[in-house]
Amino acid sequence: MGSRVEILNEGGFRSDGRRQYELREVTIDLSQQGQADGAAVITHGLTRVMVSVFGPREAKSRSQTIHDRANINVEVAISPFSAGERRKRSRGDKRILEMAATIKSTFEPVVQTTLYPRSQIDVFVQVLQQDGGVLQACINATTLALVNAGIPLLDFVCAVSGGVYSTSPMLDLSLLEENDLPNLTVAVMPKTGKFTLATMETRLHVDRFEDIFKLVCSASQALHQEMKDAVRVRTTSLVTAMGTIQSNVGGDMMMDES
Amino acid sequence: MVKPPPERPFEGMVSIHSEISPMASPEYEFGRASEEEVTMTRMLDKVLRRSDTIDKESLCVIAGQRVWHVRLAIHCLSDEGNMLDCACLAGIVALRHFRRPEIEVVGDEVTIHDPTERAPIPLAIHHSPFCFTFAFFADTSIPPILDPSHLEQRLSAGLVSIALNAQREICVLQKLGGVPLAPDSILKLVEIAVARAKELDRLVDDKLKADWSGRRVEFR
């Protein structure tokens, strides 16, 4: 076989030892960060994203005030050390602006902005390490940070990426796979099974698209479980720390709200 | 004709410039790119450049030294909704209609033949993607509509853009926020877009052929 990396070898394993439908390891850290009202660090394999949420608070300027709902302000920063090649991206970079706009519009229908008129919710996304699936990590981290900040959401938003290697669909692509394969990212609201975001940038046949799309939708359910558990653990530990409510009962009660 | 960047010595360059002036619609301000505009520019870039529409290697003249640089400028004259689809269609037709002067390479010497001297040749194009935008409304009893007008676009609660070619390949699919949709509905939209793409492809082919037949290549 020589030096060429196989995307999917004959044994059905991918370059990083995963199976076709296997997601990378997900770790979620919801601990407090500085002054932020809510924060989350999520890692998908080697991709790591940190999100801090401030608000809802008074809008900074008149122009950002919307009289009947809150304005969601998303800022994305990609650390120069996050990729293999050190590269500084300015804040005005088209790709970054687009990503911020994508995250913003993904969450606008999900966050109950109407509860906070004339205010602003700031979401700061910091990409710490990139190894494929940056957008999905950003969206998942934002969901968790919003939940952590206690901002009312209609549902979780779980994003998963997927790709197709010749005819076999694969989930959660690493950077190596992302560069070679047609890939898409879908953000699903697991309770209703509807999706708020879907992007694809590479050529893919319509029939293949159908397979991978359905697969990604079902994979998001697994991720939802993972995220829900993390929130539950965090809430329980907070409740025990406060020592006011019995940990078991209190933990369950808090979960019903989120 | 320019010098290629060192990381891609065998590929020509394609750059897309889109200009939306306040002439198109009073909504656009001069000098400042709105969010809508950024999305549109990025989408054009994805559809026409990133999906490998043009064979960039065929634009190479001498590897590492000289390549063609194709510049596609899109001017939006007036916006009555769904400017993206229109701009994509205009872009792809322009690329297919464009003919570059023929060149001759002898050793390191490059001669560019004037169009009056030798017939210019078309660009090598892999496929022609067409973009279709659907608008959704907050009221779910209203079905999604294709090619929304300006008013419909303002009233809509979400847009889905699908770019695909006549070979049933999706090049770009974009749904950014808006009303959440059921997975089945998007597959339905894709089917509709596939049929439309075939129609549009035929139309563009016919028009280009008709235009070409009106032009004469003289042999002297």
Image (spheres, coloured by chain):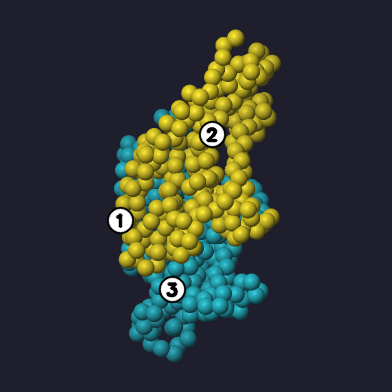
Chain colours: A cyan, B yellow
Residue A207 on image: x %, y %: 31, 43
Whether residue A37 is visible, yes or no, is no
Residue A137 on image: x %, y %: 48, 58
Secondary-structure class at tag 1: helix
Asked where in the image residue B25 lies, by quadrant, the reply is bottom right
Q: CA distance from mark 3 to mark 1?
A: 24 Å
Residue A177 on image: x %, y %: 45, 43
Asked where in the image residue B148 lies, by quadrant, the reply is bottom left
Residue B161 on image: x %, y %: 44, 51
Tag 2 subunit = B
Q: Are marks 2 and 3 on the same chain?
A: no
Question: Local crowd at mark 3 within 10 Å, few (<14), some, or many (≥20)?
Answer: some
Q: Are marks 3 and 1 on the same chain?
A: no
Tag 1 subunit = B
Q: Quadrant of the N terminus of chain B?
A: top right
Secondary-structure class at tag 3: loop
Please report the residue visible at 57 percent of the width from the left and 68 percent of the height from the top: A73
Q: Which residue is mark 3?
A: A153
Residue B95 is marked as 2
Question: Local crowd at mark 1 within 10 Å, few (<14), some, or many (≥20)?
Answer: few
Position of B166 compared to B89: left or right? left
Q: Nearer the viewer, mark 2 or mark 1?
A: 2
Position of A28 compared to B42: left or right? left
Please report the residue visible at 46 percent of the width from the left and 75 percent of the height from the top: A112
- The answer to whether mark 2 and mark 3 are in CB contact below 8 A is no
B177 w.r.t. B2: above or below: below
Please report the residue visible at 53 percent of the width from the left and 45 percent of the height from the top: B87
| Residue B111 or residue A82, whichever sits in front | B111
A95 w.r.t. B67: above or below: below
Q: Which residue is mark 1?
A: B184
Q: CA distance from mark 2 to mark 1?
A: 34 Å
Q: Residue furthest top?
A: B220
